Amino acid sequence: MSGRTRLALCAFTATMLAAAALLPLVDPVSWIVQAAVLLAIQSGVGALARRVPLARPLTVLAQVVTAFLLLTMVFARSSAIVGILPDADVIVRFGQLLRQGTEDVGQYAIPAPATASLRLMLIGGVLLIGLLVDALAVTFRSAAPAGLPLLALYSVAAGIARSSAAWLWFVLAASGYLLLLLAESRDRLSQWGRVFGGAPRAGGRNASGFEVGGTPRATVRTGRRIGAVALGFALVVPAALPALDTGLLGSTGAGTGTGGGGTISAVNPLVSLQNSLTQSDDREVMRYRTNATATDGLYLRIVSLDQFDGTAWKSSERRIEDVPAELPQPPGLSPDVDRTEIRTNISAAGWYAQNWLPMPYPATKVSIKGRWRFEPAGRTLVGDRGQTTRGAQYGVNSLLVQPTAAQLAAAPAPPENLQNEYTKVPGSLPDVVKSTAEQVTAGAANDYERAVKLQDWFASDGGFTYDTQVESGTGSAAIARFLKQRQGFCVHFAFTMAAMARTLHIPARVAVGFTPGTMQQDGTMSVGLRDAHAWPELYFAGVGWTRFEPTPTRGSVPTYTQADTSPDSPTTPAQPEGTASAAPVTTPSATADCPPELRKLNDCGGGAQRNGGAVAAPASSPAPAIAAAAVAALLVLLLVLPLLWRVRVRARRLGSGGRTPTDGAHRTLAAWREITDSAWDYGIEPDASRTPRKAAERIVRIGSLTGSAADAVHRTAGAVERVLYAPEPGEPSSLAEDVHRVRAGLRAGAGRVVRIRAVIAPRSAVRVRWGLSRRWNAAADRLKGCLAGLDRRWSALRRPSRQGG
């Protein structure tokens, strides 16, 4: 195999190993097989172009054209000429798929369904990275910079996936890069001629006096050792130093750091509420038990989205801190406002993996185990270092705030800093949003009346209909479209009302979470996927952040927004009853069949059916587990292959066969080969320049053999000399026993690490690769001979005839 062919194969392998980090992103993972086939074709075109040879830029161009034709054939065949040649319609089709893919990335949680748009982005990305790696490492003969695209591929995948198996993907990607570097170094060294040192690589009859030495491997072997040590440090050091736990090998939850500081990133947890609301099979997310007398207003809030940039509502980047024993008092809540303290015990499903903790608002105390941090502005708890709600059981003390309409109407102006932050609207917001808000609230005397008019307009007076089939979106264009079409679901109602309130200078944000759920026969409340919800929160001084409900047929309208409200709640907080707040119920678990399009605020590895109080035990989608198990099995198989090969070879060499003098000679030489290979496994490299007698003395000396083991080596070496030189060599009767004595002596004189390596990773197993290389070269020579013969015959056929007319 030529140096460039070997480099091209290593470049392909390195790209696919790095692409394995993308496996957790999409389910099913069959797309990677398609990517491997297309990348192999692209790499093959590059190899042929270099063989011609074409100029380097033309080689890269040929691969680019090939990749585009392959993607056209796979993703836009119906729009292409004869199914493969692209035209204007193909470009339009690719644009549509890429736009759809961008939307899918924002809508689906991991693992996302393998839609055509996402497969195009994944496969196209693998082909692009593969092209860059092949061009740098093979075409331009510079393997070191090829690590940059490999690093980019791994980093993007690992950063998005946040998989617990991130270390495995790192090992695969790093191993591929080391393989590429070693292949290039071997190719460069081979151009300098023979390098002295190390064991011979090619085989004649054996490696102890009967084989012809080949190209030494000492330099490449040293490179492998350095690479293995570097890879080990890359894995061990981040695990040993907590400060590095947010690097390439892992990712935290939303919070970082372990002390009182850290930040919460500006991420949008609102992921495809629409898909959850349209499922026919409502799956249980959590159950809870509360001592509240009424649960209509007991929304389980996850997080608030307070930043609107015109494209989407997001959660601002904020400081987080350790969870205090008692949470601070809610901002803006006056002592004059009635409130009741309640206790809620919650049990989350085993499949529900969310970084944010669902709980009633405003919480005053949270009892939960695990790595959780507190974000004061939104009064939310967020998981640290990968902590999620999966199977969590926790208790929450919260306030049921009950303001009157008069208190809300008389609310003074909010603080200036809060007013400035929560009334910002982007310049891209259409003017129709503000003009419509002013038109709807005309005649209102204060912000409370304006808020109520907006809520009633959306819920009943404006002619809006609730429809989960409407295209999702939270940006300026989606808000304008919603106001025109007047059809949508909770996302449209909540974000549009919040945006309109901000244009009226009312501080507003959007909360994401769940409605109260459904009462079960055992007194617990069951919350399912279709209870997922979004609602606006408006700020009123003296009351604080206040829930409104503009979505028709969903949730409950707050009593303080109803005209005839006259709450008779107690003026002082009531203590929760000691017996009403029972221990959390058994953690809900997932059922077996979770569709890939079922995505919302979780990784949807399964779900629990809501069946009147009973929670069924499920199994998650098996595809990612099967893929991970296959990769692990492949790695284990690769690790034990040398061991299996040595066991098989030893059994064949020491087995009995034939009774002729020739058979006896073969058995003697096979036993000697087994002794020299066993010595090699224990660190005594074969020396082809020595006679059997000198080689035996060297094995005895270096291996510190004594007694029967030393006698066995000398006895076998003498038998080999008789086979080679004596007219009647005879045959010792204890060849197998002598081999076992020598192996036992070598094992006894070696240290523990050397003994383990001799079994798990025997050095003599390198003969497998040498044998494959010889077979490959022989096959290549035969193929060249056949091609030369065909060329001669073709030339003879084309030779002009000498016969005259």
Image: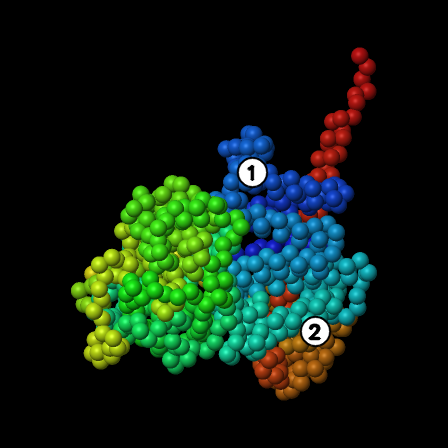
Percent x, y for residue 506? 42, 59
At horizontal 40% and vertical 71% (from top left) the residue drawn is 331
- Foreground of the two, 410 or 602: 410
Between the C-alphas of marks 2 and 1, the distance is 54 Å
In the drawing, what numbered circle is on residue 685?
2
Check the picture and name the quadrant holding the C terminus.
Answer: top right
Left or right: residue 174 versus residue 117 is right
| Residue receiving disc 1 | 72
Mark whose residue sits in front, 2 or 1: 1
At horizontal 54% and vertical 40% (from top left) the residue drawn is 94
Answer whether residue 325 is visible to the viewer in this image: yes
Q: Quadrant of residue 725?
A: bottom right
- Foreground of the two, 580 or 781: 580
Answer whether residue 715 is visible to the viewer in this image: no
Q: Amino acid at mark 1?
A: Thr
Mark 1 neighbour density, 10 Å: few (under 14) some (14–19) many (20 or more): many
